Amino acid sequence: MMLMMLAFLVDQTQQLCCPLFRATWHKMGSKRELWDRMRSLFRDFAFKSMRMLYEALFYGMKFQPPIILYDDD
């Protein structure tokens, strides 16, 4: 329960205090679209910070072919 409250507090703080979050939210058009896009990027990429994630959503990303990790065993 406390973890959910902390997540809610962090989310509300982002909405109130982070201009990049608000600009990204506005660009996506709805909070649902923003969270769907965030989830899709979380599945495939490792971001060093939330700022990096918001910048990827706001400015876009250049995609490159994946590096395949082969198991040589």
Image: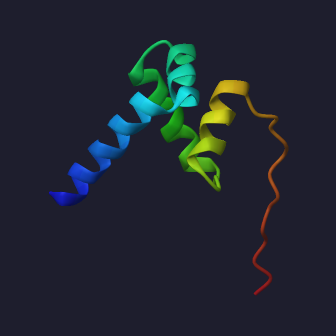
Q: Furthest-bottom residue in view?
A: 73
Image position of 50 (left or right of 7):
right
Quadrant in the picture for residue 56: top right
Number of marks present in the image shown: 0
Image position of 39 (left or right of 44):
left
Image position of 12 (left or right of 50):
left
Q: Furthest-front residue in view?
A: 17
Q: Is residue 25 above or below residue 7?
A: above
Please tell me which residue lies in front, 19 or 29: 19
Quadrant in the picture for residue 69: bottom right
- Residue 70 in percent (x, y) is at 79, 71
- Residue 14 in percent (x, y) is at 43, 36
How was the colour assigned to the protein in this rendering?
Answer: rainbow
Please tell me which residue lies in front, 46 or 4: 4
- Residue 53 in percent (x, y) is at 61, 41
Q: Is residue 69 above or below residue 52?
A: below
* Viewport quadrant of the N terminus: bottom left
The residue positioned 57% from the left and 15% from the top of the image is 27
Quadrant in the picture for residue 63: top right
The residue positioned 40% from the left and 22% from the top of the image is 31
- Residue 64 in percent (x, y) is at 84, 42
Q: Is residue 10 above or below residue 46?
A: above
Image position of 9 (left or right of 47):
left
* Viewport quadrant of the C terminus: bottom right
The residue positioned 27% from the left and 52% from the top of the image is 6
The residue positioned 50% from the left and 23% from the top of the image is 22
